[in-house]
Amino acid sequence: MKEFIKNISPFNNRTEMPAAMLVVKKLLMFIICYWAGLLLAEGAVIGAMSACGKNFMQGEMFSDSVMNLLKYYGMIVILGVSVLCWKLTEKRKLSEMGVTKHIGGWFIGALIGVGLLAVCVAAIALTGSIRFDGLFTDPDVLMILLMLGGFIIQGAAEEFLCRGLVLCSLRDRVPLPVAVAASTLAFIYPHCSTLREFELQYVFSGLLCLVVISCVFSFITLRTGSIWAACGLHSVWNFCLSCVLGLNLSGSEGASTALINMRSVGNNLLNGGNYGIEASIIADIVIAAAAVLLWQIYKKNNTERQA
């Protein structure tokens, strides 16, 4: 038992163990980093509020917009914790975590994110389940730009945890489908608390979307050999969905200010109901097709390199 505990402890870099045990070890590391980062980030936000004269214990808060900004920018703590954990426990180079010098991949991922979201929204709009009500006449451009910065941090934090700590640490040590599945479980975990608030059909469709979009993030990381494309795709998808289109993001209402006024028409599985298009069966199909395409591209490229 003592040896078993030593093996699965995330505080050492032991890897000589069965694949299942190694996966458990990395998922434990993910959970510890996620909660440690979250608690530290919340402490930092409460400290910032106290410094500004807000009494958190009495329910004194900033406006909803400012609290959203603090939430997203606070995730830089989670990002930092994941990097620190990698250096202390894995004792490997950051490039092996996917944090390479090829940061230009972020923009490639961003373009893919815009294209993928555009196809999803257009396909749903063709069913009449989403409508376009024009442009907002007086958007808060400063807030939108600040939200962009927040989403850049938020997307990177989740990718450093799921694709960095989990996928990149497992990819050469367990069968690749197992590594991708483990990173997908890690990606689903933080979203469960929001999903369970919705009706069962949206829970199933939302979970399917999390699985296929996580595969997209994993396959693009494998194809590029870097984490940056996944970070760009993740951040830009979230930003455009919330702050450009004004649609609900993963169960949260769209940003307080956006550029385009789009609205869901009714609540159904075509538009994902109040959860948003990430619980839409149409988005599930489109993203699944993108995942299959990226997997085929990765396999072809990998075969050519080995030839």
Image: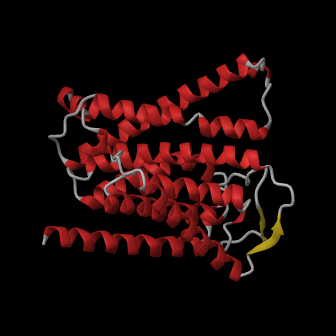
| Quadrant holding the N terminus | top left
Number of numbered tags placed on the structure image: 0
Instruction: Indicate left or right for 38 with 160 as reference.
Output: right
Q: Residue furthest right?
A: 137
- Residue lying farthest bottom? 126
Q: Is residue 231 above or below residue 94?
A: below
Q: Is residue 186 above or below residue 61?
A: below
Image side of residue 149 versus residue 159, left or right = right
Could one spot residue 151 in this view of the protein? Answer: yes
Front-most of residues 52 and 26: 52
Q: How is the image coloured?
A: secondary structure
Is any part of residue 248 visible from this angle?
A: no
Quadrant for residue 33, please give it: top left
Residue toward you, 223 or 275: 223
Q: Residue at x 79, y 25 (%)?
A: 59
Position of residue 9 measured from the top left corner of the image (x, y, whole percent): 28, 31
Residue located at (71% from left, 71% from top): 268
User: For residue 92, which quarter of the picture?
Assistant: top left
**Residue 212: x %, y % from top left:** 46, 65
110 vs 269, left or right, is left
Residue 298 image point, x, y percent = 30, 68
The residue under the point 65% across, 19% down is 47
Residue 97 pos. (x, y %): 32, 44
Which quadrant is the C terminus positioned in?
A: bottom left
The residue lying toward the viewer, choosing from 150 and 278, is 150
Instruction: Kindly identify the residue that appears in the image at 39 percent across and 62 percent down.
Output: 220
